Image: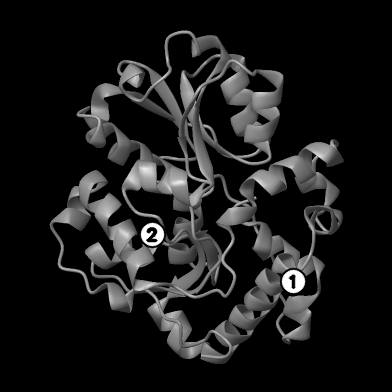
């Protein structure tokens, strides 16, 4: 669901309306999507903004040009089997925690929250569980003690296992502020390399317009109407559950596609704690995103 606008833009025909032909490719985590961009098999990534900052720390220019989420939209939750002993982040010490992939945004969130609770990054074992069905299977199998998952997987696992503990909920301003100390946290964006953006600025602008149209459409339609336009393979067999999950995560979506300076700074703050290479780097955040392609600017 954190990348729902990317899919909806295609289902609603907004890419075609803007004159671009888009092929969507799925990857098991943001780190792998970034690798595809670096390797040239993808032109643009629908991923988390923090990757542009990570690349800036390596003196590589990657730029976010439309923002889809204002909160990360993920939930750190105990597994059903570990619920009796894992009810807080300090209780994760010595346990196994699932992230989408090593080096992903969920991995950075975990490292930050461990540090906030005076725990070293290596005080837990981290394992890749992907997202969607694979993350759901991992957490319900009992092979991990906790995991980052998003909706609709979280809504489903909580319904089937009401005793699980929510350790961090990044779907709301309140939960994001509790975790990171800030109410706005730039999350899912469309980003690309600076070189591609400079060479294909018109195409990027068309993508930005398609995304802003999608966010506007989402803001003016009900959860049921949105769910009706989501492909069955993504929303699953339980339509009512998907609508319930969408209601719970509705607040995460941006209304205008713009990045805010505060939202970008919040991401830098988390990465300063969780990634030494970012902490030690001199980074001009203004070069990691642009609002210049957002309609109505």
Q: Name which residue lies at 22% across and 27% down.
A: 119
Q: Earlier in the sequence, mark 2 or mark 1?
A: 2
Please provide percent x and percent y for residue 233.
81, 46
Relative to 48, does residue 78 appear above or below in the rendering?
A: above
Task: Name which quarter of the figure residue 141 lies in.
Answer: top right
Label 1 crowding class (10 Å Cα cut-off): few <14, some 14-19, many 20+?
some
Please provide percent x and percent y for residue 125.
35, 23
For label 1, the residue is: 217
Q: Name which residue lies at 78% across and 37% down.
A: 241
For label 2, the residue is: 51
Of residues 292 and 173, the one nearer the viewer is 173
Of residues 35 and 142, the one nearer the viewer is 142
Q: How is the image coloured?
A: one colour
Residue 92 appears left or right of 239: left
Check disc 1 and report its element: helix, strand or loop: helix
Residue 152 appears left or right of 52: right
Relative to 285, does residue 167 appear above or below in the rendering?
A: above
Q: Name which residue lies at 49% across and 60% down.
A: 70
Task: Name which quarter of the figure residue 198 lies in.
Answer: bottom left
Of residues 102 and 116, the one nearer the viewer is 116
Residue 214 appears left or right of 93: right
Please provide percent x and percent y for residue 102.
40, 40
Of residues 56 and 240, the one nearer the viewer is 240
Query: Quick check: can you spot residue 269?
Result: yes
Relative to 96, does residue 182 appear above or below in the rendering?
A: below
């Amino acid at each position: 669901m954190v990348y729902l606008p990317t899919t909806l833009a295609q289902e609603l025909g907004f890419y075609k309306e803007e004159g671009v032909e888009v092929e969507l490719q799925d990857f098991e985590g943001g780190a792998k999507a970034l690798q595809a961009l670096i390797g040239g098999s993808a032109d643009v990534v629908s991923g988390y903004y923090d990757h542009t900052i990570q690349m800036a720390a390596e003196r590589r220019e990657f730029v976010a040009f439309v923002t889809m989420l204002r909160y990360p939209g993920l939930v750190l939750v105990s597994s059903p089997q570990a619920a009796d002993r894992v009810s807080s982040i300090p209780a994760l010490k010595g346990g196994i925690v699932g992230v989408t992939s090593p080096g992903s945004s969920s991995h950075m969130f975990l490292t930050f929250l461990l540090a906030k609770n005076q725990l070293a990054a290596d005080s837990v074992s981290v394992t890749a569980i992907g997202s969607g069905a694979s993350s759901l299977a991992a957490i319900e199998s009992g092979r991990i003690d906790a995991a980052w998952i998003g909706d609709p997987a979280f809504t489903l696992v909580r319904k089937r296992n009401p005793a699980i503990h929510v350790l961090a909920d990044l779907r709301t301003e309140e939960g994001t502020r509790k975790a990171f100390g800030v109410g706005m946290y730039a999350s899912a964006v469309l980003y690309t390399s600076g070189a591609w953006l400079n060479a294909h600025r018109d195409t990027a602008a068309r993508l930005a317009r398609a995304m802003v149209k999608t966010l506007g459409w989402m803001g003016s339609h009900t959860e049921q109407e949105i769910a009706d336009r989501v492909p069955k393979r993504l929303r699953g067999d339980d339509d009512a559950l998907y609508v319930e999950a969408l209601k719970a995560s509705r607040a995460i979506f941006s209304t205008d596609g713009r990045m805010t300076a505060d939202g970008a700074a919040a991401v830098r703050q988390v990465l300063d704690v969780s990634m030494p290479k970012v902490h030690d780097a001199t980074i001009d955040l203004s070069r990691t995103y642009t609002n210049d392609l957002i309609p109505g600017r």
